[in-house]
Image: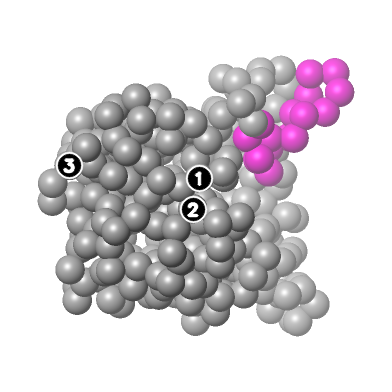
Amino acid sequence: MKKILICGATSFVAKEFKELLIQQGFDVDTFGRKDGSYLEIDKNPILADSYEAVVNFAVLKDQSIEDNVSYMKSLVEMCKQKQVKKLIHFSSIMVYSYHLGKLDENSPIDTVANTMMEGYGKIKIACDEFLNSVKQSLPFEVVMVRPGYVLADNRPAPFIKRLPCGVSVILGNKKSRQPIVKREDIHLALLKIIETDKNLPVYHLFQNNDITKYNFAKQTVGGLILVLPKFIFEGLPRLMMKTGLMKKALYSRFDGMYNYNVASSTMTESKLNIKFK
């Protein structure tokens, strides 16, 4: 029986993933904050002697970028000790610049030095940068999965703001995009990655239909859909950022509202024989 370790198993995205693996015949261990420090996971005595794969959902949201990279270093060291065959790291589509135009599984990520983001997005970029810098020298496979926004448990799309009388506002305009994915589709993709030999280095987990925020809102909430004019909600903040009246990190939020990237998951769907719905 193959043994799997899930780090961050109590996170929203990981919910019910352990149960799916058990149903498929895997022996599953989990690791969370209650089990010890992520920063010293390589020294934790509760872990088994070996694992077929490690699936990492954990991110230290309330800690620094340096702490998150330290966790990645400790995680890599633990994988070496436990003779892990593949480390599957839960990344994010937020690691890409909003200005690539088109992106697929081979597209370059943004960098910590250049990004205007702070918080979660910058942490994800830093962790991916570190893993990219060491993966060629590691004795196991490093697989990064980059999902869109995750929908489950009636979780609303973050770019749709509902108002009274059947009116909704889109954070963006009619051309803005935000890839989305259902949590159950993420779990099925992760299961296939665990069972696949010679994975792609990067997988994109989101619907491959190039839907805009506006069209998604029409399909899901209906009613009157309003948009935010770009020249006010992106142009004015850009001017304020350039003149020093707005911090780059705050401006990046407005910039992201008008993300026009056409993101593809074609390579992922082909390799895993899966269709994101």
Q: Which residue is rendered at x = 78% and y = 24% of the image?
A: 167
Residue 166's place in the image compared with 49, above or below, is above
The residue that mark 3 highlights is: 196
Across and down, in percent, residue 81 comes to: 28, 69
**Residue found at the far left of this picture:** 198
Observer-side mark, 1 or 2, equals 2
| 10 Å crowding of disc 3: few (<14), some (14-19), many (20+) | few
Q: CA distance from mark 2 to mark 3?
A: 24 Å
Residue stretch in magenta? 156-171
Tell me if 253 is positioned left or right of 261 in this view: right
Do tag 1 and tag 2 residues touch (Cβ < 8 Å)? yes
| 10 Å crowding of disc 2: few (<14), some (14-19), many (20+) | many
Across and down, in percent, residue 133 comes to: 30, 77
Observer-side mark, 2 or 3, equals 2
Label at residue 31: 2
Q: The residue under label 1 is which amino acid type? A: Ala
Do tag 1 and tag 3 residues touch (Cβ < 8 Å)? no
Element carrying mark 2: strand
Observer-side mark, 1 or 3, equals 1
Q: Name the foreground residue: 275 vs 179.
A: 275
The residue that mark 1 highlights is: 9
Across and down, in percent, residue 17 comes to: 44, 35
Element carrying mark 3: loop
Q: Which residue is rendered at x = 66% and y = 18% of the image?
A: 222
Q: Earlier in the sequence, mark 2 or mark 3?
A: 2
Across and down, in percent, residue 109 comes to: 39, 66
In the rendered image, which quarter contains the C terminus? top left
Element carrying mark 1: loop
Q: The residue under label 2 is which amino acid type? A: Phe
Q: Name the foreground residue: 249 vs 82.
A: 82
